[in-house]
Image (spheres, coloured by chain):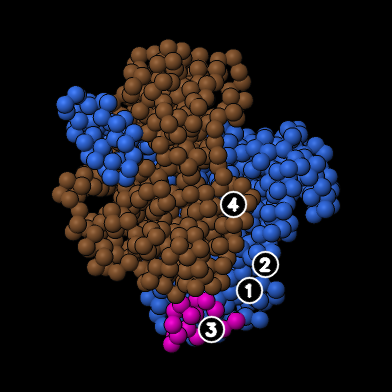
Chain colours: A blue, B brown
Amino acid sequence: MVEFVDARGDDPKEVVSRLRRPGGFLSEPVRKVARDIVSDVRDGGDEALLAHTERLDGVRPDPIRVPLEEIQAAKASLSPEVKESFGVAIENVRFFHKRELDRPFETSRAGATVGQRIRPIRRAGIYVPGGHGAYPSTVVMAAVPAQVAGVPEIAVCAPPGRDGSVSRHVLAVAGLLGLDEVYRVGGAQAIGAMAYGTESIPPVLKIVGPGNDYVTAAKLEVFGHVGVDAPLGPSEVVVIAEAGAFPERVARDLMAQAEHLSGASAILLTPSEELMRSVEPLLTGEPAELITLVRVRDSAHAVELTNLYAPEHAHIISEDPEAILQDLDAVGMVAVGDFTPVALGDYGAGPSHSLPTNGAASWASALGTHDFTARTNYIHYGPEALADLGPHVMRLARLEGFPNHAESVGVRLPKGG
Amino acid sequence: MVEFVDARGDDPKEVVSRLRRPGGFLSEPVRKVARDIVSDVRDGGDEALLAHTERLDGVRPDPIRVPLEEIQAAKASLSPEVKESFGVAIENVRFFHKRELDRPFETSRAGATVGQRIRPIRRAGIYVPGGHGAYPSTVVMAAVPAQVAGVPEIAVCAPPGRDGSVSRHVLAVAGLLGLDEVYRVGGAQAIGAMAYGTESIPPVLKIVGPGNDYVTAAKLEVFGHVGVDAPLGPSEVVVIAEAGAFPERVARDLMAQAEHLSGASAILLTPSEELMRSVEPLLTGEPAELITLVRVRDSAHAVELTNLYAPEHAHIISEDPEAILQDLDAVGMVAVGDFTPVALGDYGAGPSHSLPTNGAASWASALGTHDFTARTNYIHYGPEALADLGPHVMRLARLEGFPNHAESVGVRLPKGG
């Protein structure tokens, strides 16, 4: 059943607290399961990894790493049309992320140089979910930013099917991108294996990619030992639509997000009672259970609710969508205007489709090259610059009770200086 | 006792595994304590926060929030000299971070616009450690990047002394920076309070700042619900010094890092037996226990070990320090050249002194404006651009089994298109 909310007279925070948002990966039972699996794999290596894979996926993949010939065969088996479409997606995603790449800087004044290097992480792990389907697009959306960032080693984990093999399309895209390190394991056990390493899987320094609640919880468990991206949980969209929107299009936008199922959430914010009434009959089947239609006062009210909810995606269907874009401040990706369905972003407009969910858009970014680089700051002082700053540093170090800090400056200043 | 290592003939990975690195915040007992405190505060609010504060700090601060007059009085009590030195530090840190700030972009081709906004996080929390001393410099090093990023609400937590008050210098720097929201609570309980909110402390969206093992472990626990920065644990330095280095200076550099105690680690990498022998007698007292002198083959060997160890700080004392800087790829901050003691960075050369520790420099960045911003991507397609990309998206969406994704494009294409 589609849910209706009339938000016009209510406190915005209270409205947002009523909107569907599962966030199961933060629940203590899920965290506990993920923690136990991760520590089993940390302590038990391949044997624990295979035991959990057998228990959860019904198969013991052998070998764990996909043979290169299998990747090449999958790539060769692609139809020319599908290969072309993946090629277009890869080119767009590469174009966007080349533009996104952070740039180093260096600046000098009065004999003091300060700067920042941007360097690729040496080895990254990408999780590609399986389960209900296969997501070759996720390989594009995580591996291309990693490659643009210059990551020299990229490992991919994807859950095996009942026959022990990884989706042919996932392997084919790996082949198109020149990735040759793919492991047929999934779930929290794959996260544990990438974080701590096993006999078959050398450990990575950072793990990215979307997954189910257990995968996401496992990433939270290993964070600190390795890096991880933002929580990429069940998919969400807020569609902000004015009275002039076409109901059939809005209905498809909502159904598209909701057909992810697994706790997805699709919300329409509109001031138009008529639009709501026209859209509602077009929402059918299981996805309709995950859709909420919210009556708002006006566009400003819609923006206020969206910023509080901080959705993974927003789609703006308005006479002046750019104005609304400028007011949104907590969304993973915004699709602007009626001719930009969110699906374009999902498959290849340019930005990664790996986006913060469950409100994390209020503090986290879309996956990008910045997830595959780290910043090293540096300072280079000459003797005069040291003489200028040194006495201040000595004073503050002594104030905090660190005489050796002060003296590490003092021994470098001219005597009597 | 200073420790000696001869690394010349050994496997680099094996050498690095022998170097001191506590990383206690990742241990399961510490994680468990932090988890329990955080969940107590989440469930119990102010009462739980005060109970843990009384148990650990011996006092129940009342009120929890520092009155504004106290901040103003602390600021007014600063001597002109100390005020000037903090002013110099603040100006340098602001200068660096203005330069660092990520920039938005937008680019169009063939009717398709893609772009990225960089937006400040709405509300951030800064942890300022106490314990052995007071660290007003940490307020500068976290709050200035937050302010440059444009964060409108900044909350500060600092542990109370036995008398229930926060260090006067911490309050004074808060006053200098115009911060008026300071809470006298510390430890894992302060992290829990900022993450989940209590009656006295409105929740924040992201928590940053260094702390002891329990504070760091608590940040890992709340990650996912809120954002956190990299693990900022016990301090570390690697000093890479050639034969020409002055022993007295090198000794001070090592002692400066080691005087942080609490699991700090200071390592000298040098090819010079003579330098090691000259430095060793200058290392005294408790800090000397935390210092390791490592004999390496040459500078390239030193770089290899440093990159594997991924220290918080590196200091390069060499005839050609710039060349070594270019080869380092996993360090939080590098101090380049003999006239640049690390202490300059600690107190006010420009970059933040909040840096990834325990090897996290291999995947994480120095604290900076990027910790206080998030990226929102957007796409804006016109009808022609949709007609170009749309069929590819429809094909890939159907391949993955998402007919509504495909139709959200299809309903926007010309009939028969």
Label 3 belongs to which residue?
Answer: A5
The label nearer to you, 4 versus 1, is 4
| The quarter of the displayed image where residue B199 is located | bottom left
What is the spatial separation of the Cα atoms under label 4 and label 1, in whole angstroms?
40 Å
As drawn, the label of residue A160 is none
Q: Is A185 left or right of B390, judged from the image as shown?
A: right
The image position of residue B405, as x and y in percent, is 61, 63
The image position of residue B310, as x and y in percent, is 50, 33
Quadrant assignment for the N terminus of chain A: bottom right
Q: Residue furthest bottom?
A: A9
What is the spatial separation of the Cα atoms under label 2 and label 3, in whole angstroms?
21 Å
What is the spatial separation of the Cα atoms under label 1 and label 2, in whole angstroms?
8 Å
Residue toward you, A197 or A405: A405
Q: Dot 4, crowdedness within 10 Å: few (<14), some or many (≥20)?
A: some
Q: Amino acid at mark 1?
A: Leu
Label 2 belongs to which residue?
Answer: A261
Secondary element under disc 1, as helix, strand or loop, is: loop
The image position of residue B239, as x and y in percent, is 42, 26
Q: Amino acid at mark 4?
A: Val
The residue located at (61%, 47%) in the rendering is B27
As drawn, the label of residue A290 is 1
Q: Which residues are magenta?
A: A3-18
Q: Is residue A307 magenta?
A: no
Share a chain, discs 4 and 3? no
- What is the chain letter for disc 2? A
- What is the chain letter for disc 1? A
